[in-house]
C-alpha cells in the first residue's frame, strides 16, 4: 500500500488533471421538448428491456418446470413398466406352474389308467 502522503499527492494530481465543471445557478434538469421526448424514449427502452428480461425469465422457469414434469413422468412410466414386467413374470410363472400341475395330473391319471388296465389283464402291479 502507498503511504498516506503519496495517496494525498495522487488525489491532488487527479483533481488538477480533471477540469472543473462550472456550477450553474439554473436548474439543468429543465425539460425542453427534445429532452422530454428523449426521456420518454429512454423510459420506453428500459420498459421494453424489462419486459424482455421478464419474458426470458418466465420462459426459462417454464422450461425448467416442463423438464421436471417430463422427468417425473418418465420415471413414473419406467416404474410402471418395471412393475408390469414383474407382474408379467409372475403371471408367466403362475401359468407355467399351472401347466406343470396339469401335466402332472394327466400323468397321474395315466398311471391310474395303467394300473386299472393291468389289474384287468391280471398283470402284476408295480410296487409304487
Image (cartoon, helix red, strand yellow):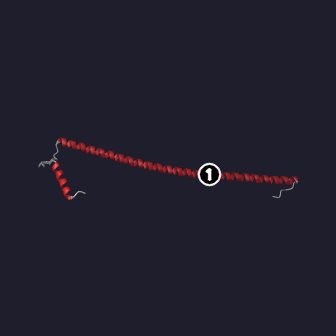
Residue 27 lies, in percent from the top left, at: 14, 48
The residue closer to the viewer here, 30 or 18, is 18
Question: Residue at position x 45%, y 50% from top?
Answer: 68
Toward the right, the furthest residue is: 122
State which quadrant residue 37 falls in. top left
Q: Residues within 10 Å of mark 1 (few under 14, many from 20)?
A: few
Quadrant of the snapshot with the N terminus:
bottom left
The residue closer to the viewer here, 38 or 117, is 38
Residue 40 lies, in percent from the top left, at: 23, 43
Is 20 on the left-hand or right-hand side of 66? left
Residue 51 lies, in percent from the top left, at: 31, 46
Question: Residue at position x 77%, y 53% from top?
Answer: 109
Which residue in the structure is indicated by mark 1?
Answer: 89
Is 52 on the left-hand or right-hand side of 35? right
Quadrant of the snapshot with the C terminus:
bottom right
State which quadrant residue 34 falls in. top left
Is 97 on the left-hand or right-hand side of 16? right
Toward the left, the furthest residue is: 25
Residue 48 lies, in percent from the top left, at: 29, 44
Amino acid at each position: 500500500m502507498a503511504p498516506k502522503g503519496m495517496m494525498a499527492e495522487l488525489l491532488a494530481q487527479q483533481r488538477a488533471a480533471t477540469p472543473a465543471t462550472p456550477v450553474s445557478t439554473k436548474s439543468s434538469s429543465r425539460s425542453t421538448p427534445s429532452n422530454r421526448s428523449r426521456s420518454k424514449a429512454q423510459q420506453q427502452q428500459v420498459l421494453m428491456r424489462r419486459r424482455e428480461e421478464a419474458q426470458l425469465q418466465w420462459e426459462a422457469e417454464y422450461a425448467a418446470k416442463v423438464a421436471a414434469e417430463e422427468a417425473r413422468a418418465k420415471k413414473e412410466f419406467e416404474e410402471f413398466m418395471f412393475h408390469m414386467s414383474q407382474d408379467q413374470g409372475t403371471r408367466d410363472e403362475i401359468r407355467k406352474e399351472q401347466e406343470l400341475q396339469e401335466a402332472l395330473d394327466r400323468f397321474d391319471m395315466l398311471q391310474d389308467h395303467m394300473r386299472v388296465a393291468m389289474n384287468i389283464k391280471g398283470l402284476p402291479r408295480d410296487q409304487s
